[in-house]
Amino acid sequence: MGLQESEALDVERIREDFPVLQREFDGQQVVYLDNAATTQTPKRVVEAISEYYYEYNANVHRGIHQLSQEASIAYEEAHDTIADLVGADGREETVFTKNTTEAENLVAYSWGLNELGPGDEVVLTEMEHHASLVTWQQTAKKTGADVKYVPVTDEGHLDMEAAKELITDDTKLVSAVHVSNSLGTVNPLAELADVAHDHDALIFGDGAQAVPNRPVDVKDLDVDFYAFSGHKMAGPTGIGALYGREEILEDMEPYLYGGDMIRKVTYEESTWNDLPWKFEAGTPSIAQGIAFAEAAEYIDDVGLDNIRRHEERLTEYALDRLAAFDDIEIYGPTDPTERGGLVGFNLDGVHAHDLASILNDHAVAIRAGDHCTQPLHDKLGVAASARASFYLYNTTDEIDKLVEGLEDARDIFA
Ligand code: PLP
């Protein structure tokens, strides 16, 4: 298969949108397979940023003047676009944050510190990213609540029978990663939401690895909170979103205080602005917010179902090619339709960091480390793993280059 391999996408055309993919190191074109960390940015998203700075740079919400009005409209409408992307009811349910991590912390500070107490339980999964795991672990410590973990099976799935036992009337919140950034597993978030709601608990979905590459509808999933990051979905860094059910966000205290998030301030008291501005104190990331919406429109134009199918094909191809190595251990489900577009693995006798370094000599960019899932790696019995992760512009030829690099690594360490 070559560049035209995917029936789902015109990859050759798409690659023209990403100039960075033309970069060469020592005469070798870069093969970017670190998309689960950060995706590349298409021209129209970069242009949305320069257009803002060249044509209507001004602070939002406050100005009567024309530039501020234009910036305000674009920034506010960006919330509507992001709300549409994930099926939220509107901007009232769509708070812009710095990233997924900040969205988790917003809910932990604003909801968790006020609602959790001794005897309450927070249920996480063993495959949580530190963004969720550390945040809820520390919030539980501060409030006297307990944390429980839904186990991961040997096949890399969530043990849903155990989840049903662990989630009880003491559970106040379930926080689960939608698509695991280490195993690739697509978790049954809607089913978990049902179990949580049966016990009057809230559920937080970490969509950092889901929103970039598949259609997501927060109402279908029936989650109460859901978070994702712009820089993992063809958007800029410094911007992400928290979806929250409107009635819950209404009841929550602000997370940060200051300008823009208030309605009326006296020397004694303050009242809060409407949603979502109540949670966006101070001057926000205006250019990033506008470009975040541009990225959402870009992936929506390509088609999120197409992106999902393309990633499934690449994952299937990668799993097949890696399966030919008898000294590679692959983590996560074996069925490519049950996982996102990433493959975590280890090559026997070669540390993941050495592997990444040899692949770098081949101009192949992968990730090596614990991928912010240290407890999961402890459970797998490894300190680190290598991770190749795909996006809409990747090809099977690039996976062949990954495999060539792995063969080279094996020869070097043999
Ligand atoms: N959750 C998952 C599943 C992730 O993969 C990541 C990033 O790798 C995060 C959360 C944190 O995202 P950010 O660093 O953008 O806050």
Image (cartoon, rainbow, N blue to C red):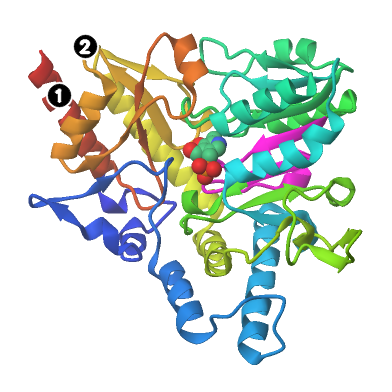
Q: Amino acid at mark 2?
A: Gly
Based on the displayed image, in which of its 4 quarters is residue 116 positioned? Answer: top right
Based on the displayed image, in which of its 4 quarters is residue 151 positioned? Answer: top right
* Disc ID at residue 225: none
- Horizontal and vertical percent position of residue 375: 51, 16
Report the magenta residues as a range. Answer: 202-227
Q: Amino acid at mark 1?
A: Ala
N-terminal of the pair, mark 1 or mark 2, is 2
Labels in figure, total: 2
- Horizontal and vertical percent position of residue 383: 37, 15
User: Is residue 316 shown in magenta?
Assistant: no
Q: Secondary structure at mark 2?
A: loop
Query: From the viewer's perspective, is residue 241 above or below residue 43?
Result: above
Location of mark 2 (residue): 349
Q: Residue at x 51, y 32 (%)?
A: 337
Residue density around tag 1, few if under 14, some if 14–19, many if 20 or more, within 10 Å: some
Q: Residue at x 32, y 48 (%)?
A: 5
Tell which of 346 and 254 is nearer to you: 254
| 23 lies left or right of 51 | left
Q: Secondary structure at mark 1?
A: helix
- Horizontal and vertical percent position of residue 309: 48, 44
Please identify the quadrant where the N terminus is shown.
top left
Residue density around tag 2, few if under 14, some if 14–19, many if 20 or more, within 10 Å: few
User: Is residue 206 shown in magenta?
Assistant: yes
- Horizontal and vertical percent position of residue 110: 78, 42
Q: Residue at x 77, y 33 (%)?
A: 203
What is the C-alpha distance between the residues marked 1 and 2? 10 Å
Location of mark 1 (residue): 409
